[in-house]
Amino acid sequence: MQDNPAAPKKRMGPIEWIRTYGYYYKGVFAVAVIVLIVILAFIFLLRYDGADLRLYIVTQDAVEDEAYYNFLQNVEEYVYDVDSDNTKISRQYRYTLSESETSLPLSELPEKAATNDCLCFIVDDAGYEYVSSLCSLRELSFFEIQSDADNPYRLTLNDTSLLEGLTLREGVTYYLVMKYIDNTEYNDVFLSGRTDIIVGMARNNDKSEDNNVTIQS
């Protein structure tokens, strides 16, 4: 019996197509895979800035430039090469509630704070209130950091070596706070290493990569 020429042809599924023609086009497949890997690597490099530490600074008014840059110089003592790219890089993002000329647009902070690139904040009292409304904070005892007696979520920095000798605004207190991140996220070696840097600064007595910040889920 002859086939019915009007009958619709059955379309091949992707797996059946590969089984049928894969042998003849394996060179094309190999090139396509390589191109895909290159594209993904390029996208990753565009998005990754190589930072071993990111600091998000949120204050009512801008910190004076001299004090700000001296503070960053003190911070560098604690930074180490978390991602093993043979460089130690820290990046800072300055935000002010008064929207000063030296600060980044405050409107972009909620999106940044929602990612795991953001682990901690340096804040004053107004900044603390804003950050507390923006995201959940982690009690510092979770990291074995001695917090303020009246607030388990923040550590006063004014009397630490990070701000020692700096000329700060009179009557302004600065704090370190940690964003709440699910325990399982700390299984990521890079995130754990970046947290390690912050813990070293907060403990104020460890300028190495030996804090062993490994959070068990």
Image (cartoon, rainbow, N blue to C red):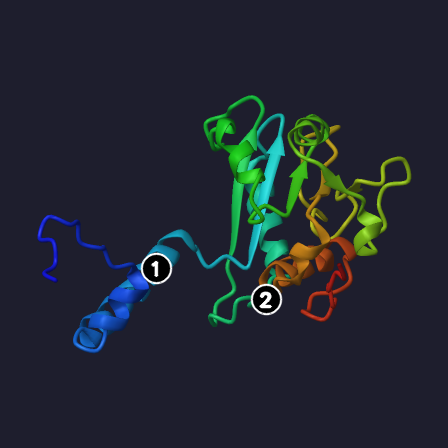
- Name the amino acid, label 1: Leu
Q: Which residue ends up furthest to the top in the rendered image? A: 98
Instruction: Tell me which amino acid carries mark 2.
Output: Tyr
Q: Residue furthest right?
A: 149
- Distance Cα–Cα, label 1 vs label 2: 27 Å
Q: Nearer the viewer, residue 10 or 115?
A: 10
Task: Please identify the quarter of the rendering in which residue 49 is found.
Answer: bottom left
Looking at the picture, how far across and down is residue 67, in whole percent? 60, 42
Q: Is residue 74 above or below residue 66?
A: below
Q: Residues within 10 Å of mark 1 (few under 14, many from 20)?
A: few
Whether residue 167 can be seen here: no
Please tell me which residue is depicted at 50% across the width and 57% down the height of the picture. Answer: 51
Viewer-side residue, 165 vs 99:
99
Residue at (79, 45) in percent of width and height: 159
Which disc number belongs to residue 116? Answer: none
Q: Does 12 appear above or below 106? A: below
- Which residue was labeled with disc 2? 80
Give the number of the disc on residue 40: 1
Quadrant location of the N terminus? bottom left
